[in-house]
Image (cartoon, rainbow, N blue to C red):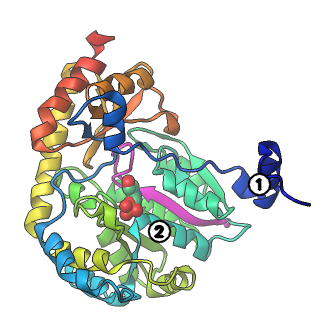
Amino acid sequence: MVLRLDDPVAVTAWLERLAPAHVRTLDAYQPGKPIEELERELGITGAIKVASNENPLGPSPRAMTAIAAAIPGVHLYPAAAAFGVRRALARHLEVAEDALAVGAGSNDLLYQLVLAVVGPEHEVVSPALGFLSYRLATEVAGRRFVTTPATPRGPDLDALCAALSPRTRLVMIGTPNNPTGSVLTRAGAERLLAALPEHALLVVDEAYAEYAAAYPEIDHVDGLALVRAALAAGDPRVVLLRTFSKIYGLAALRVGYAVAHPGVLGLLGRVVRTFHVGTLAQVAAVAALDDDEHVALSAAHGRRGLERIAAALVDAGVTVYPSLANFVLVDAGRPSGPLYDRLLRRGVIVRPMAAWGLPTCLRVSVPAATDLERVVQALVEVIGRDQA
Ligand SMILES: Cc1ncc(COP(=O)(O)O)c(C=O)c1O
């Protein structure tokens, strides 16, 4: 047979037969448009992107210096097991180096976990309204993803525990969770651990941990303490994921890490791609980790910004869900699509939540201090109740 490239129907049929069943049913990730592209389309300038939970303070100056210094060495392959990052993290977190693995973002580690431990007969269980990559990482591998009920205020832990079975290999939960901002309490984490089947891992995704640390008065689990306690007790079933993409301001470089039992990380080592974390990412991560001042400033900025946005929107009659991250989920009470468009025309790019089954909600990240009042004003004027 000769494939007729000028016949789209034939090409589609050919592609359908080329891909295995679990790939045929997947949708490709739809990335948001680059800010410059949107500005060009709308004929505006100075747009503010509050759609991806990035750190508006930028990277640590120390990371920028380290990147510049490492550029002459980029003809060499990077350190394969990110040795320097693991050593720096071991010191910083007070865990053994062999309890640390570095990934190309924590996203990469999610994919590695599924590949390493979830077989065709197994399941990944996660509450609804979670980070979309939990499902994606599972379904890309052709594995079964089971969701349990949740509201924007948090997961139904009874339902989550009841869904666990001998088929469960991974339980994935974000705290603070993206997109809701909700957290797992210390007691909630203990409950989950008590209900965890023998051959399952509890994956605690703390991409926003350093932002949540700005709320010591609010009960939320410390994933690091949880994994440390499990390791000390000889329990290998807790995996902590964190990232340099959020408070450390290195999203473009793709670097995250896992803290877990060395044996579990050994399984990840069997599926990982070689040289998956580049040198510039590694040196930037090491330098950023030491910049306590940048982290503290960023966390304080996050809390201040959230409080300002939340207060203004509550005053405007909008439902605002509690968040301990650098973003907030708001419910406008009417379809968010037109609101998103109106905000866009005002140069404010938020994230509509229809893909999560929340058609009236929007997620808003904390912007730079210089942009905060413009974002607040646009939100109040576009989604405030009396604007309906
Ligand atoms: C809850 C959560 N986990 C993990 C990630 C992945 O981050 P990265 O792959 O950039 O480390 C994100 C990014 O948005 C997130 O929100």
* Bounds of the magenta segment: 166-183
Q: Residues within 10 Å of mark 1 (few under 14, many from 20)?
A: few
* Residue at 43% from the left image edge and 72% from the top image edge: 239
* Residue at 36% from the left image edge and 55% from the top image edge: 175
Q: Which mark is residue 15?
A: 1
Given residues 325 and 343, the one toward you in this image is 343
Ligand 1 within 8 Å of the CB at mark 2: yes
Q: Residues within 10 Å of mark 2 (few under 14, many from 20)?
A: many
Quadrant of picture, ligand 1: bottom left
Given residues 340 and 68, the one toward you in this image is 68
Quarter residue 295 falls in: bottom left
Ligand 1 within 8 Å of the CB at mark 1: no
Say what amino acid the circle numbered 2 marks: Asp
Q: Is residue 122 left or right of residue 79?
A: right
Please tell me whether mark 1 or mark 2 is closer to you in this view: 1
Given residues 355 and 281, the one toward you in this image is 281
- For label 2, the residue is 108
**Where the N terminus falls, by quadrant?**
bottom right
